[in-house]
Amino acid sequence: MYRYISSFTQNHLIMDQIKVFIKDFKDVPKLATSKLNLEHINSLKDIQQLSDQWQFNQAMTVIKREFEFPTFKESFAFMSSVSDISDQMEHYPKWYNKGNKVIVEITTPQVGLTIKDILLAYTMDNISDDIQNEDIQFISQQSKLTSQSTTLLNTWNKNYSRFEEEVASQLQRNVNQF
């Protein structure tokens, strides 16, 4: 039983270190930029349900992903949508666009991976999904999530609560087994 309670306590300690509720992307520049360790990164990947397509370099200082869209129009709409939110966050990706593909690298210079990088990756995943499901008519069209960023951030915030509930539920099941 100690093992299950210890695991529960460890998950809560990690959660306390990485839980960041955000009301507006304009609040992101004020966030502390401490480097995330491997345990924090893996927890955030699970909590925020980041795509498995994100790859981390060996030093865990850069996160990278290639996005592929049906046409150049969608890839450009994706970049335009992300650009607006990146400006609000004052946190910018390094990216390369060729036709329908966008290759993205995210890091916080002089620090490594921070909560800002995970938030930007999470935002890109959601904008990509939205662009894939929209009928993009023109090159400068943006994802509806760009203008509904509150919805995106509410989901980010709710993911922490959902994860805490899952951990507590698992602990209860383990305790009941004894």
Image (cartoon, rainbow, N blue to C red):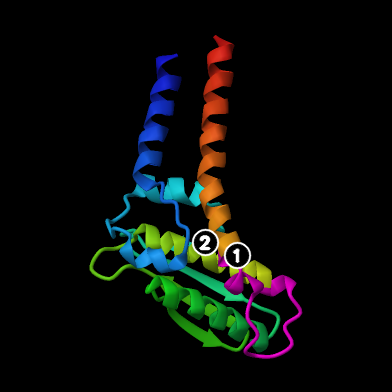
Q: Can residue 66 be seen by looking at this rendering?
A: yes
Name the quadrant of the N terminus.
top left
Q: Secondary structure at mark 1?
A: helix
Which residue is the site of mark 2? 122
Name the quadrant of the C terminus.
top right
Q: Residue furthest left?
A: 110
- What kind of residue is marked 2? Tyr
- Can residue 29 be found in the magenta stretch? no
Q: What whole-number distance in Å separates the C-alpha atoms at marks 1 and 2?
A: 6 Å
Q: Is residue 123 left or right of residue 63?
A: right
Q: Residue furthest top?
A: 178
Seen in the picture, residue 10 relative to 83 is either above or below; the reply is above
Which x, y percent locates residue 30? 32, 63
- Taking the spot 56% from the left edge, 78% from the top edge, the residue there is 81
Which x, y percent locates residue 90? 37, 74
- Can residue 136 be found in the magenta stretch? yes
Seen in the picture, residue 29 relative to 175 is either above or below; the reply is below
Is residue 159 or residue 8 the one in the foreground? 159
Residue 66 figure quarter: bottom right
- Taking the spot 52% from the left edge, 76% from the top edge, the residue there is 82
Q: Which residues are magenta?
A: 131-149
Which x, y percent locates residue 80? 55, 83
Residue 126 disc label? 1
Q: Residues within 10 Å of mark 2 (few under 14, many from 20)?
A: many
Seen in the picture, residue 133 relative to 135 is either above or below; the reply is above
Proximity of marks 1 and 2: CB atoms separated by less than 8 Å: yes
Is residue 59 or residue 74 the one in the foreground? 74
Q: Can residue 56 be seen by looking at this rendering?
A: no
Which x, y percent locates residue 153? 53, 59
- What kind of residue is marked 1? Asn
Is residue 18 or residue 1 the one in the foreground? 18
Residue 148 disc label? none
